[in-house]
Image: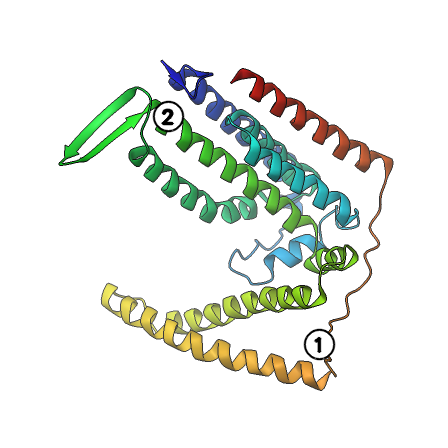
Amino acid sequence: MQIMDGFPSPWGQIAAVLLAACILAGAGICIYKVKTRKNNKRHAAKPPAFFDEHILDDAAIHSPLRKVSAWLKLLFCLSAIVISVMSPLPYLPLFIAVVMICASLFIAKTSPRLYGALLTIPIVFAVTGALVLLFVSGGGDTLVDIFTIGTIHVQITTKSLSLAVLVIARTFAGMCSLYFLALTTPMTSLFAVLQKIRIPQAFIDLTMLIYRYIFVFIAEAISIHNAQIMRGGYSTWKEGLNAFSMLLSMLFIRTWERGEDIVVSMDSRCYDGCMVLPDEHGRVTPLSVSCVIVFIFVILSLLVWEMALL
């Protein structure tokens, strides 16, 4: 029984890869927690607010990798994303995901609780999409025959299983790479990089405004939701539905008003259609350059090895 002409033993190898990735990620988190347990007891730090609209910017500003060149971090993450998407097997994306998790936890000193909370939403979407592919896409040998309704035949085949695992692995690797970049590099540094590579200024300004409005939207939703909770808006299921519908209607009005306030504040600061960005002065050390080059060489070698297996 084979998957994708070169992906042998679906149950054994797929389970082994997933188990190895979970063990490595879990071991990394456990080691990190044990290592920082004493410091946490001595310095009772306030737990991060996962729904704070400034959580990503705060984490990036306080990251030990904050002063590292944004060019290097962008090259590091983009190469990982592109190669994980090009990978025909899930081995390389899972390896990239484990590397990014370890880099975020041990090098960037990101809180495991914060990192796990950030990964929750994309993992849910990835698993949902993978389940659809698992039951809808066909091809290969039948592993589990569930039911048949007319012309609709719901079953799990070798190719659908391999495709679902590949989608989850690629999504996991891509999100881990993006979170490493977001948790170590402030957005102003990334916008400065875009400006240096001659991206049109209108596109950069539009991106900055969209990025700003995302957090305006989140902040307004949080304030309205907290006010509803203080007034018992979600005490019962029926009241929760009414409160949620009111939240959506008020959210549109409040964000529109906040948007007009931002336009007025920009005009009062003599905005002429061009936003001034601070210069990017990141460190480029031989160690950081060597690490990026070695990482890209390793994942390229693994990509060639995977393609040779097919």
Q: Nearer the viewer, residue 273 or 130?
A: 273
* Dot 1 amino acid type: Gly
Image point 47% across, 46% down: which residue? 122
Query: Residue 38, can we see it?
Result: no
Q: Residues within 10 Å of mark 2 (few under 14, many from 20)?
A: many
Which residue is tagged 1? 273
Q: Secondary structure at mark 1?
A: loop
Q: Which mark is residue 159?
A: 2
274 versus 307 height, above or below: below
116 horizontally vs 300: left or right? left
Image point 86% across, 35% down: which residue? 286
Q: CA distance from mark 1 to mark 2?
A: 52 Å
Image point 59% across, 83% down: which residue? 261
Residue 72 point in image, percent of width and height = 76, 43
Query: Residue 39, can we see it?
Result: yes
* Dot 2 amino acid type: Lys
